[in-house]
Amino acid sequence: MAKRDFYEVLGVSRDADDKTLKSAYRKMAMKYHPDRNPGDAAAEASFKEVNEAYDTLKDGQKRAAYDRFGHAAFENGGFGGGAGPNGPDFASTMSDIFEEFFGMGGPGGGRRSGGRERGADLRYNLDISLEDAFHGKTVEIEVPTSVTCDTCSGSGAKPGTSPTTCRTCGGAGRVRAAQGFFTLERTCPTCQGKGQVISDPCKSCGGAGRKTEERTLSVNIPAGIEDGTRIRLAGEGEAGVRGGPAGDLYIFLSIKPHDLFKRDGADLYFNVPISMTTATLGGQFDVPTVNGSTSRVKVPEGTQTGKQFRLRSKGMPVMRSSQFGDMYIQVVVETPTNLTRRQRELLSEFEKESSGENHPESAGFFSKVKDFIDNLGA
């Protein structure tokens, strides 16, 4: 007998989304489940048909192939064929329904830890100076964390004894219970999912297999490291439970704001105020660099505020490279204040002797303003 259309089997349209498919499958699976229809061969056949349809349509690749080729897409071993109620994907299919109903995995689901659990990852925030980021350094940090108990070697049991297999779950960490026509699986209440029971716990750690200590770790800060960089120290997190693997430690770096320099990648920026006379007549000044030396900057005559000077290779090192960024010096012309009478007289004389050639930018600007006003009047 020819197979029915899978969308027809589930009673949904061909453009149904995943949520609609799952809801339809849930209703049909409940309707035709063998436990609800004992001895009904027709219901059993419908139940298999519903599972095969949903197993195909819930998978994006299988659904695309089915939409294009129909049932022929799965003949001769294509896509491994549909999965019936005893097929390899049936357990995962039913697990989806169990999870939606009860918030847990179906039969065979859940994590069986056997008592060994990976330790938690830790985070440590580390602040360094710009100079430290320039030179690189090794920093020692104190990290409070859980470490494996050296008395019981992480087993949690008193030395000379060992944990025993949980009798309630047989070491599986989970137990099953029948509820109606479903079989539910949950964490074993006796061993709390560990699969083992400690009758005589270690006195040093109280049976936990680990204890809290403060460790000193060395962290290598490479030259040129940038703000926000994360450094991972594998296995330096919390110790695992009962001999499980340790977690990792993540160092999050922050570079403190600098009093003089502002950083942009490998480049540094530095504002320098200069006097009006230096900007007018020209001159020079020395600036510090982040490596502790100084560099000389020559100011040409007529320098304006905002003029930028570039000092090549005076910036930050590029991490894991022999290259350096640049340093940019931007000058700000400072207007003199608190003038004496004589200074005022000299400036007034200078103003009388000045012309548009001495102030080309302001002369040009006010010329444009005058033309604009004259045009408005016209």
Image (cartoon, rainbow, N blue to C red):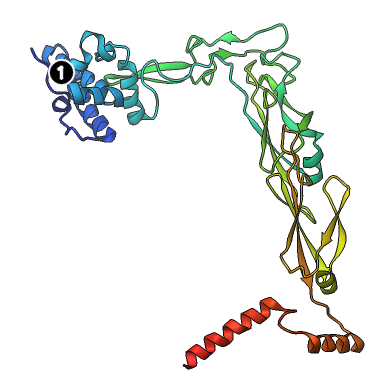
The extreme top residue here reads 160
Could you tell me which quadrant the N terminus lies in? top left
Q: Residues within 10 Å of mark 1 (few under 14, many from 20)?
A: some
The extreme bottom residue here reads 377
Q: How many marks?
A: 1
Residue under the image location 86 percent in, 87 percent down? 344
Q: Position of residue 165 (x, y in %)?
A: 55, 8
Q: Position of residue 97 (x, y in %)?
A: 31, 26
The extreme left residue here reads 1
Q: Secondary structure at mark 1?
A: helix
Q: What residue would you read off at disc 1? A: 46
Q: Position of residue 216 (x, y in %)?
A: 80, 29
Q: Quick check: 69 above or below 123?
A: above
Q: Quick check: 373 above or below 250?
A: below
Q: Amino acid at mark 1?
A: Ser
Report if residue 324 is visible in the image. yes
Relative depth, front residue between 276 and 336 = 276
Residue under the image location 81 percent in, 70 percent down? 279
